[in-house]
Amino acid sequence: MFFKIDPDNGVAIYDQIVRQIKFAVADKAVLPGELVPSVRELARQLAVNPNTVARAYRQLQDDKILSSVRGTGLQVTAGAHSKCTNARQQIVRNRLKEVLNEAAGSGLTQSEVRELIETAISAIQWEASHED
């Protein structure tokens, strides 16, 4: 599992971990029954405090995305895919709403905002599986 943590993006590191695991499950990059890295392993990989990873994992357990398997670790739950697909849409929708509210408050017109969005979309390298 690949993680990209950005300490400067304004989103708490534990929340970035939660989101990326949810996105990976929604994308079927991680399937039900698969184990996630241990707290120590992921903390070492990301160069973050193990408590940060533990907090993210607790949140994912509370959200019923991960469950504990005695003596083995944490695995993705059977119903996680649909929950994560819904969560991914909600997370992105909320982030877009924040950006659009900021754009509206800045005095940009709708056509200027649309142009900025189209330019941003064109600049992103979309994977074939995500294209319409």
Image (cartoon, rainbow, N blue to C red):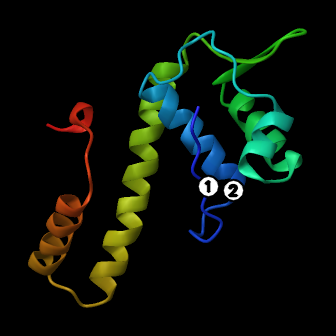
Q: Earlier in the sequence, mark 1 or mark 2?
A: 1
Across and down, in percent, residue 104 comes to: 28, 81
Q: Is residue 29 above or below residue 47?
A: above
**Distance between the alpha carbons at the discs numbered 1 and 2:** 7 Å
Q: Residues within 10 Å of mark 1 (few under 14, many from 20)?
A: some
For this rendering, which residue is in front, 22 or 96?
22
Classify residue 22 by image quadrant: top right
Q: Quadrant of the C terminus?
A: top left
Q: Would you name the residue on which mark 1 appears?
A: 5
Q: Are marks 1 and 2 in contact (CB under 8 Å)?
A: yes
Amino acid type of the residue tagged 2 in the rendering: Ile
Across and down, in percent, residue 40 comes to: 86, 37
Q: Would you name the residue on which mark 2 appears?
A: 13
Residue found at the far left of this picture: 111
Q: Residue at x 41, y 28 (%)?
A: 27
**Residue 73 image label:** none
Q: Residue at x 48, y 36 (%)?
A: 23
Across and down, in percent, residue 112 comes to: 13, 80
Classify residue 42 by image quadrant: top right
Q: Residue at x 79, y 54 (%)?
A: 48
